[in-house]
Image: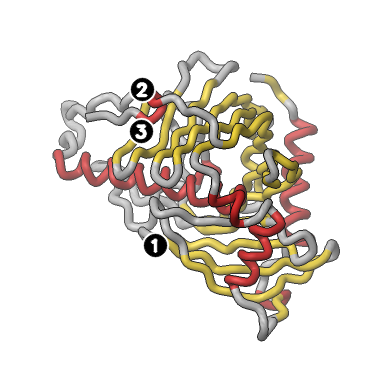
Amino acid sequence: MRAFGPLVRLLRSLVVFAASAVLVTSIASFVHLQAADAAAVLAAARDAMGGNKRIEAVRTFIANGRTRQIRGDNLVPIEFEIQVELPDKYSRRDEFPAQDAGPATAGFNGDRLIQIPPAPPAVARAGGPPAPTPAQQEAAMRARVATARQDFARLMLGLFASSYASFPLSFDYVAQAEAPEGTADVLDVKGPANFTARLFVSAQTHLPIMLSWRAQAPPARGGGPGAQSPARGGPPPGAPAPPGTTPPPAPVENRMYFADYRDVDGLKLPFRIRRAVGSETTEETIFDRFRINARTDARRFEVGN
C-alpha cells in the first residue's frame, strides 16, 4: 500500500465536478420530453453498443483488470477476474497484492451464494449475543445473493444496456438532464428486492454514462477475505441485520460512471468504471481485457453446501 495524496484528491475533485456539472440530476435540471420512452432509449443504446444480435449472442465472458480503491490518502490495488455464464452465473475473484490476504471469490450460481473461501462459522461468545439460528444464517445467505445479483445487474447495464432472467429489470423514462457537455436521457430502473436505480444514457453517443442509486455503505474491502467494497452498494433494502449489531446508517447516493468505450468483437464496451459514494470517489476500475464467449472455469461457480 502506498500513499497517493495528490492523486486521491484529484479523483475526488473529478467526481464532485461530474456530479455537479456533467450530470445534473436535480429536478430543476430536467427537461421532460413527451415523445421519448424507455424502450426507444434502450434500443438506441444497444444499437450503439453493437446491436441486439451481437448482444444476444453473448453467452459467456471473462473480464480481467485492476481496481484502485481509495482509503484515506491511500490507493489500495486490487487485481480481479470476472467470469459470467449468462443468465445466472456470476463470479468475481479479487487478489490483494499489497495486503497479507489470499484471493477472494464472490458471486452467485442460480439462487446459491459463491463465497471462496467460505465464511467461518459463527460461534457464541461468553457474554455476547447468541449464535445465529439456521433460519438467520439462511436469511443472511439470501441477502448476500441478492447483493451479488445487484452488482451483476449494475455491471450488465453498463456493458450491454440489458437485464437478464437472473435479475429482471423494468425501465421507465424520466426526463432529459442538461449538462455543459450535452444531454443525457434518464431512465428509472426497478428490479427484485426493492432494487431501484437511475440510468443515464448519452443523447449524443447513446452509450450509458452513469448509474446512480441509494444504498447503505458496507465496511471497506480489505478487512479479510470476502469483505465488501463501499462502492458495491451494501445489503439490499430490508435485509436482516446480524444479531447484536446496531442499526445501519441512512442510505447514501452511490454512482457508477462508465467511460472509455472500445470495440471488442463488434461490441462497444466500457474499459473504465469509476465509483463514488456521496461526494467521494471510492474506486476506479480499469479493464485490461474482455473475452467474449470464452470457456469459463467451472470451479469459479462452485457453491457451498
x%, y% of residue 102? 46, 16
Mark 1: give few (<14), some (14-19) or many (20+) Cα within 10 Å.
Answer: few
* Residue drawn where x is 21% and y is 42% of the image: 138
Instruction: Estimate the spatial distance between the alpha carbons at disc 2 and disc 3, rounded to whole Å.
Output: 9 Å
- Quadrant in the picture for residue 262: top right
Q: Are marks 2 and 3 in contact (CB under 8 Å)?
A: no
- Residue farthest to the bottom, as pictured: 34
224 left or right, relative to 44: left
Instruction: Estimate the spatial distance between the alpha carbons at disc 1 and disc 2, rounded to whole Å.
Output: 29 Å
Mark 1: secondary structure: loop
Q: Amino acid at mark 3?
A: Ile
- Quadrant in the picture for residue 121: top left
* Residue drawn where x is 67% and y is 46% of the image: 267
Residue named by callout 1? 194
25 or 157, nearer to the observer: 157
Q: Amino acid at mark 1?
A: Asn
* Residue drawn where x is 63% and y is 29% of the image: 65
Residue named by callout 3? 114
